[in-house]
Amino acid sequence: MCVTAVESRPAGVLDTTSTSRRPFKARVMAFIALTKPRIIELLLITTVPVMFLAEQGVPDLWLVLVTCLGGYLSAGGANALNMWYDRDIDALMERTSQRPLVTGMVSPNECLAFGIALAIGSTLLFGFAVNWLSAWLALGALLFYSIVYTMILKRRTSQNIVWGGIAGCMPVLIGWSSVTNSLSYAPVILFLVMFFWTPPHYWPLSMKVKDDYARAGVPMLPVLASNKVVARQIVLYSWVMVGASLLLTPLGYTGWFYTVVALLAGGFWLWEAHALQNRAKAEVSGAKLKEMRLFHWSITYVSLLFVAVAVDPFLR
């Protein structure tokens, strides 16, 4: 979902126009945009299938609904707080120059209050409607993303997305704990899959928009290192990610269907990662580098893998 101001604006300009002058419908859509719905879709894709795995069948549908709602509100709160803190650099980057705080559709105080309200509301919803283990995990993810990643890591280290990605791994733990009110090796393995998935998922996009990050002074790895170095890191993380994805079966959590999907999807991922590395070694640049091929496949990969997680219990 992309929400812009009434008028289009260039990067580098922070609109301070009174929010009272903005149309009501556009304001509502702007608050929705603060939650970054497209990112949350991916988080839910990794939450619900784990609930099927934990249940070894179909979990209670009301529990699924409440868990998804709580997850949306929690992640939405984290994203709103991220936009509140990053509004200065968002104004400098073309990719984020139309976000609600930059355009003036939402004021900083409104965004901060909105993010805090979602954080409190989601924690209470998880605690009273699901269980308190899930509530604390969700709150921990929110605080980690909002404070550790956004306020500490993002502007200070090229390893920002590596460790900051921990917040995006938490939904697999939440999905499992919502069903069992406990944790186990299975969600931890899937947590590791997502942990090692995040850098090779995000670095290709960072390669594409590294000029944006450089202009904003954000030390993403592609800003500080050559394409060859970044591509080598992508390949290393990719191999560890695929290896981690195959641990579920020997430990008895999944069967043949998941294994086949993990092998095929992981194999194609590695093909694309090595192809990107070969192009980087050949010093290919611009559109011919085709770094976004791996970025787009990374979304397909995680979708296929977690669909297999959900389907596998019915085929064993």
Image (cartoon, rainbow, N blue to C red):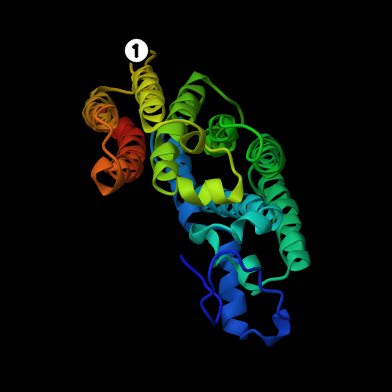
Q: Is residue 287 left or right of residue 162?
A: left
| Quarter occupied by the C terminus | top left
81 horizontally vs 213: left or right: right
In terms of secondary structure, where does tag 1 sit?
Answer: loop
Q: Residue at x 33, y 35 (%)?
A: 305
| Residue 55 visible somewhere in the drawing | no
Residue 254 position by quadrant: top left
Task: Compare residues 135 and 279 and report the one nearer the observer.
Answer: 279
The vertical placement of 232 against 303, above or below, is above
Residue 70 in view, yes or no: yes
What residue occupies the far front of the structure in this picture?
A: 283
- Under mark 1, the amino acid is Pro
Q: Is residue 33 above or below residue 198?
A: below
Where is residue 212 shown, x and y percent of the image?
50, 52
86 or 47: which is nearer to us? 86
The residue carrying mark 1 is: 250
The percent position of residue 198, horizontal first and vertical second, equals 46, 34
Q: Residues within 10 Å of mark 1 (few under 14, many from 20)?
A: few
Q: Nearer the viewer, residue 169 or 58?
A: 169
Q: Position of residue 309 (x, y in %)?
A: 35, 33
- Does residue 31 sit above or below 164 in this rendering? below
Residue depicted at 24% across the width and 24% down the height: 263
Quadrant of residue 290 in the image? top left
Q: Who's the residue at 49% across and 45% down the image?
A: 43
- The x, y position of residue 5, in whole percent, is 56, 76
Does residue 181 appear to the left or right of 115 in the view shown?
A: left
Looking at the rendered structure, the number of numbered marks drawn on it comes to 1
Vertical side of 99 occupied by 186: above or below? above
Q: Quadrant of residue 217?
A: top right
For the point 37% across and 33% down, the residue is 227
